[in-house]
């Protein structure tokens, strides 16, 4: 199994630009989570999906952030417009409802907004 | 609301020495507890988890943790560390009230620095 795949691994952009982060969960997993990691705030849950449906987006910081899951094998996290304070490592994780609570994390996308 | 506190931000230790990384949680309901490890430039990997049963949980790479309900703690231990254990360690909690979502609340992390 290839594990959770995220792309790109690194993204450098300028303030005001649109940024799209991508995630492919492990095949067969029915939950998908998006996290953000910063030195100041640690690891924060942004949003999670169950069977492609967003369940809880209370962690999404602002309207500039949006996430979609058009099918079971693909999700995107979009920031538009991006700001320097969005600089962070963004992780995607997935899990199967039959495996008690174990989330499998992707390698992360390191986003730098100049 | 749940919360997780990792009491040490950094723990320096010499190779082959024992180590304990401390974690306390706050929750009004029964909880499930986890330790994850993050190696440099990688995602998080599950070390071990407590769901029920024996309060002493063994995980990968020789780590173990003990669930103490009265002290609301879930400290991580290893009797002899290796250089390769240098990483960031995260304690996390999920409550039974979250149903089957497995939604996790993470602590701030502890950096374990193993010195030769």
Image (tube, grey):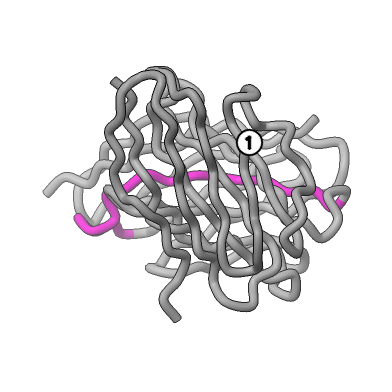
Q: Nearer the viewer, residue B82 or A82?
A: A82
Tell me if residue B113 comes above or below residue B52 in the rendering: above
Q: Numbered disc 1: what chain?
A: B
Q: Residue at x 40, y 67 (%)?
A: B62
> Quick one: which residue is furthest to the bottom in this view?
A1
Q: A62 above or below A37?
A: above
Q: Secondary structure at mark 1?
A: strand
Q: Quadrant of residue A17?
A: top left
Magenta segment boundaries in residue numbering: B80-96
Find residue A58 and report its horizontal and vertical position in percent.
74, 32
Q: Residue at 67% of width from left, 47% of height from top?
A: B104
Q: Is residue B6 left or right of residue A50?
A: left
Front-lying residue, A106 or B45: A106
Residue B43 in percent (x, y) is at 40, 54
Question: Would you say residue B37 sits in the magenta stretch?
Answer: no
Residue at image location 37% in from the left, 48% down from the top? B19
Where does the image place residue B31, in percent across and percent down from the top left? 78, 49
Query: As drawn, is B32 to the left or to the right of A23?
Result: right
Residue B63, quarter of the rendered image: bottom left
- Horizontal relation, residue B73 to residue A104: left or right: right
Q: Residue at x 54, y 66 (%)?
A: A25
Residue B89: image location, x then y, percent: 43, 46
Number of marks in the image? 1
Q: Is residue B109 visible?
A: yes
Q: Which residue is mark 1?
A: B24
From the viewer's perspective, is residue A40 above or below residue B17? above
Placement of B47 over or under B36, stated as above or below: below
């Amino acid at each position: 199994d290839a594990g959770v795949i995220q792309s790109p691994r690194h993204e450098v952009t300028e303030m005001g630009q649109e940024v799209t982060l991508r995630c492919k969960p492990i095949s067969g997993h029915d939950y998908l989570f998006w996290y953000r990691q910063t030195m100041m705030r640690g690891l924060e849950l942004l949003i999670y999906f169950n069977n492609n449906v967003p369940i809880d987006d209370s962690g999404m910081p602002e309207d500039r952030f949006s996430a979609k899951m058009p099918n079971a094998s693909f999700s995107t996290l979009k920031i538009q417009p991006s700001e320097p304070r969005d600089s962070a490592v963004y992780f995607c994780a997935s899990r199967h409802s039959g495996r008690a609570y174990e989330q499998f994390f992707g390698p992360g996308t390191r986003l730098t907004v100049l | 609301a749940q919360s997780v506190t990792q009491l040490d931000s950094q723990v320096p230790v010499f190779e082959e020495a024992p180590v304990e990384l401390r974690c306390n949680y706050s929750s009004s309901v029964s909880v499930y507890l986890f330790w994850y490890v993050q190696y440099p430039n990688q995602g998080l990997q599950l070390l071990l988890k407590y769901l029920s049963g024996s309060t002493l949980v063994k995980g990968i790479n020789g780590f173990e943790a003990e669930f103490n309900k009265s002290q609301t703690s879930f400290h991580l231990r290893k009797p002899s560390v290796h250089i390769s254990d240098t990483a960031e360690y995260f304690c996390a909690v999920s409550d039974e009230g979250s149903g089957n979502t497995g939604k996790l609340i993470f602590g701030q992390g502890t950096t374990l620095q193993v010195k030769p």
